[in-house]
Image (spheres, rainbow, N blue to C red):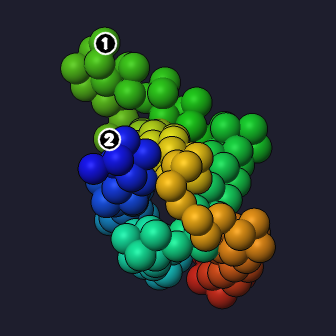
Amino acid sequence: MHRSSATWISATRVWIPIAAALFTVALIVSAVVLPELRLLHVLQALIYAAIVILARRNSMWAIGAGLTIAVVWNSLNIFVTHNMQRGVTAFWSLLQTGQMRELGPRSIVPMMVLLGGIGHFVLISACLAALFDRRIDDKKPWKMVAGGVSVLAYFALIIMVSAPR
């Protein structure tokens, strides 16, 4: 097997599904803790199912969608809501004390945002590894852009339709 083809295969067959699984676990736990997020999180999980399916087909749409959703979601949670930092703080407190100060959404959800963020960093790395694989012939930029635009449009739509008010 050619070295670069091994990179593409491990990115699309191993790391993208692992990243999607990490993020989906974060969605599930958050939906259990905050029932008002259940519909939003079910609809959001469909994004990661589509990315995994398309990545297995070596589609550049998956690379565009994966990179876009991961960068946008992580950016929002690092620079706007600061939920990723809250997750680090809650997790660090759990490691130091062996207990959570308050058991409930105020401590669990930020840790799930952190887990989702880690999943997204893995997704970004896997998508970049697949993108820079030299063996891939079908690297049409419009397909990546279309994947990114599609995932953002869908994400905006599900937030408008199902986000708690």
The kind of residue tagged 2 is: Leu
Other-residue count near label 1 (Cα within 10 Å), few / some / many at <14 / 14–19 / ≥20: few
Residue drawn at x 69%, y 74% as measured from the top left: 143
- Marks 1 and 2: CB-CB under 8 Å? no
Q: Tell me if mark 2 has few (under 14), some (14-19) or many (20+) residues whose alpha carbon lies within 10 angstroms of its own.
A: few
**Residue 123 visible in the shown view:** no
Question: Is 91 displayed left or right of 114 in the figure?
Answer: left
* Residue 32 against residue 16 in the figure, above or below: below
What number of labels is visible? 2
Mark 1 → mark 2, Cα distance in angstroms: 16 Å
| Position of residue 139 measured from the top left corner of the image (x, y, whole percent) | 65, 65
* Whether residue 147 is situated above or below residue 97 in the rendered picture: below
Q: What residue type is disc 1 on?
A: Gln
* Residue 139 in sight from this viewpoint: yes
Residue furthest to the bottom in view is: 161
Q: Residue at x 31, y 30 (%)?
A: 100
What residue occupies the far front of the structure in this picture? 2
Label located before the other in sequence (1 or 2): 1
x, y percentage for residue 140? 71, 69
Label 1 sits on a secondary structure element that is helix
Residue depicted at 70% across the width and 44% down the height: 75
Q: Position of residue 20 (x, y in %)?
A: 39, 59
Question: Label 2, on which residue?
Answer: 103
Relative to 114, 131 lies left or right: right
The quarter of the displayed image where residue 157 is located: bottom right
Q: Indicate which label's residue lies in the foreground, 1 or 2.
A: 1
Name the foreground residue: 19 vs 125.
Answer: 125
Which residue position is annotated with label 1? 96
Q: Residue at x 35, y 47 (%)?
A: 2
| The C terminus - image quarter | bottom right
Vertical placement of residue 80 versus 101, above or below = below
